[in-house]
Image (spheres, rainbow, N blue to C red):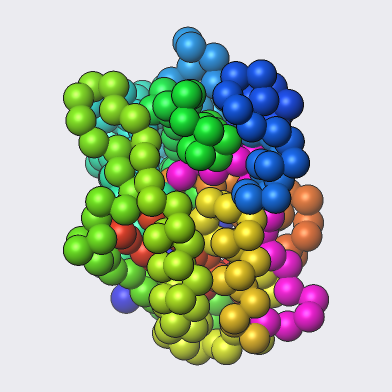
Amino acid sequence: MPGTRIAALGHHQPDRVLTNDDLAGMVETSDAWIRQRTGIVTRRIAAESETVAGLATVAAGKALAASGLDPADIDMVVLATCSARDRCPSNAAQVAGALGIPSAVAYDLNNGCAGFCTALASASHSVRAGAARHALVIGAEKMSDVTDWTDRTTCVLLADGAGAAIVSAVPDGGDAVEPDGIGPVEWGSDPTRGDTVRLLGDWQPRFAQEGQAVFRWVTTELPAVARRACERAGLAPGDLAGVVTHQANLRMIEALVRQLDLAEDVVVARDVAESGNTSAASVPLALAKLVERRELPPGAPVLLLSFGGGLSWAGQVVHCP
């Protein structure tokens, strides 16, 4: 079976920047309160006319251009989202149509904030099995559509954006010249805690969560998931060049990574400070920025770890394009 690798990345965020001071004029909060509890300083909010498919198309177009592939080379499009209003045709199919991808299998995947890493693993498995040569994997959210702007505990967190990756086959499972770049996935869920993060109801649901319960779960149980993902890739956490977790809360991220025995010079994604919590988009968005800024060099091993509603998790070690 062939191996797989991330061949290229792309990202996109809306133009509008919503600051903590802006939010202080909307609900009872302050810049100091938000920074202390979440680490967030700014977030991006899409215009009314912007859609999940539209955000995804821009990010995916950048990844496709960076890969050097033609649209006809893409055999699969998987879009992870939990906030999309459109049901059919799928948002993935809309992206394929906008980019001129002629005949790829295209579908949406909803695993909450764990969606992108779940989609990445699913696409990697399809490529390894020979069902596709090149897959376009996207995480895209318009969380502003499902935000309760009167709830100061959640409206300060959520934001909009998209990130995308091209997953391609590596012949013969990889070698020293072109290594297998996507490690085995460590994933699962705990449905007994499914009501801890919620987006339930009619066509206009509102995001809600039990923040302290999520924080305890992530900081007590996810370090073991991270270590197992590294072990499955044949690495120790200290071998990692970078760690990109779901960008939920800066305090949560820092509490999690402190438990992993990482190298002193490891790069830890902290994009949440400028982008907020973009759910399924947060991991590819943060990873693409680090690669674009050359903070992570080509071939660098990076742990991706996503978690959220379900409660679900998915993580794998990848090598940067």
Kindly identify the residue that appears in the image at 45 percent across and 67 percent down.
216
Q: Residue furthest top?
A: 49
Magenta stretch encompasses residue 264: yes
104 or 15, nearer to the observer: 15
115 or 216, nearer to the observer: 216
Q: Main secondary structure of the magenta part?
A: loop
**Image position, residue 103 (x, y; %):** 28, 35
Q: Is residue 321 above or below residue 208?
A: below
The answer, for residue 15, to whether it is visible in the render is no
**Image position, residue 218 (x, y; %):** 46, 67
The answer, for residue 276, to whether it is visible in the render is yes
| 102 sits left or right of 243 in the view | left
Kindly identify the residue that appears in the image at 38 percent across and 51 percent down.
210
| 32 sits left or right of 307 in the view | right
Total labels drawn: 0
Kindly identify the residue that appears in the image at 55 percent across and 76 percent down.
179
157 or 224, nearer to the observer: 157
Q: Residue furthest front?
A: 28
Kindly identify the residue that appears in the image at 73 percent across and 74 percent down.
266
**Image position, residue 197 (x, y; %):** 34, 49
Q: Is residue 7 above or below residue 298?
A: above
User: For the C terminus, which image quadrant?
Assistant: bottom right
The span shown in magenta is 262-279
193 or 119, nearer to the observer: 193
